[in-house]
Image: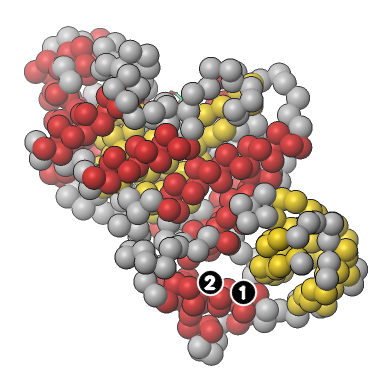
Amino acid sequence: MKITRSLSGVALSAALLGVGFSNAFAEEETLRSLADKNNIYIGAILNSQWFGGGLPGNYEQIHKTQFNIVVAENEMKFDATEPSEGQFNYNNGDKMVKYAQQNGMRVRGHALAWHSQVPGWVNQKYGGNKKELLRVLKNHIEKVVGHWKGQVAEWDVVNEAISNNEPQWRTGSVWYQGIGPEFIDSAFVWAHAVDPDAELCYNDYNLEQGVNPKAKAGFLLEQVKRWVANGIPIHCVGSQTHVEDTTTDKHFIGSPDSLRSLAKELAKLNVKLKITELDIGFKSGINVSKSDLERQGQTFRQYLDIVLEEPNADTYLIWGVSDKWSWLGGLNRQKGLIYDDNLQPKPAFDSILVRLQTYEPPQDSSDKDSTEKDSTDAFKAIAGLTSLSIHLSGRTLSIAGATATKVEIFDMQGRPVFSAKNVKGSVDLKVTEGLYIVRVREGSVSLTKRIAIH
Ligand code: 9MR
């Protein structure tokens, strides 16, 4: 159920066969190129500031280089697309769809039926009026999904309809109060009728807190079973996955393992799991150390492993690019993303990158085709088309074809264990016996290899 084989993977294989392309591929590997190779989507929102042109140029450069899926932070929500009754505004959404098309990215639509960011007129004119609210919601979904039919590949049809604590429906929502829980069933049916090719998701937070009837995901799972049994066109569950670092939140009860259990339960129903809004924040006000950031990177990797390893998981979307532009402050959290305030990659970026570089699908996996392993090797060979090369003798790593190289060593779980800057010629690797990944880089050229230290 993973995405179909990517263009870049095909091109890489072609390059290996000598068809050309060598210069085009003497580039640094990106999250995007590696996501393509692994048949998954990796993305980040376009922050609202982007739509007004208020972000530095390297923000967009990073965004389109590193990601192959995009979602708007606020610009496709109800209040943005239908601010007054019947007056639709698609300008910002169109801008993002155009950007995605120009850069070959998949588009997620977020969100159609939600209790928040509903314009005032809905409640003022129609609060509590079931017939009118059904008409308003149906019209909204038909117009918005219809406008982007064939361009928005997947929609959050219903967002956050379950309450936080005692799992039950969120009763305060204008849709729930006026219509009842069947607004959910109807929303999926209406969206599907307009764009039968779009993937339709139920999206919510705190779904990484266990799949038992007392947890939100357990309650949701019962609903998904009912929807599937009733023929409601639901294709995916979006897990927002706004989580806090394990050491700073004493009440933290979420975990990648719990989310993986949800993915496995959904697989039995032929429903996908997507990670749609990931951030892993620290409490505001605390000092965040280098080792905190490295631990954060490991948590990012553990959530990525679900998407790499579970056949019905295909998407890893982060709710922001840089810590500088993040909603997390409002939640009393900080530093939850993979680029720092200066748009420099954090250890979490490296952790994700290395995991994508080293991941090898199980041999017997039926949804991975046999040429994929070849393209992995191809990438390393193509990196080798640059003049950069390495040689290991004992613990001494010699580097040729570069003058001031950064050397990084990662263990097989992608944890950084050694690094050295400005290496000229050779460096002694201070690591114990074992298997590692070495990455050497200078400027935009990098080379990644697996090494064994005896
Ligand atoms: O990041 C969004 C922020 O700019 C808005 O002010 C906020 C308003 O509700 O919504 C934020 O995005 C939310 C998303 O739409 C749904 N899941 C939770 C996200 C973070 O609050």
Tag 1's secondary structure?
helix
Q: Within 10 Å of the Cα at label 1, are there few (<14), some (14-19), or many (20+) other Cα atoms? A: some
Give the labeled residue for mark 2: 376
* Image location (x, y in percent) of residue 396: 86, 69
Give the labeled residue for mark 1: 380
Looking at the image, the residue that sits furthest to the bottom is 18
Question: From the viewer's perspective, is 189 left or right of 286?
Answer: left
Q: Within 10 Å of the Cα at label 2, are there few (<14), some (14-19), or many (20+) other Cα atoms? A: many
- Tag 1: amino acid: Lys
Q: Nearer the viewer, residue 356 or 118?
A: 356
Question: From the viewer's perspective, is 401 left or right of 10?
Answer: right
- Tag 2: amino acid: Thr
Question: From the viewer's perspective, is 11 left or right of 220?
Answer: right
Quarter of image, ligand 1: top left
Tell me what residue is drawn at x 55 percent, y 77 percent. 378
Q: CA distance from mark 2 to mark 1?
A: 7 Å
* Image location (x, y in percent) of residue 158: 27, 31
Any part of residue 74 in sight: no
Tell me what residue is drawn at x 42 percent, y 27 percent. 209
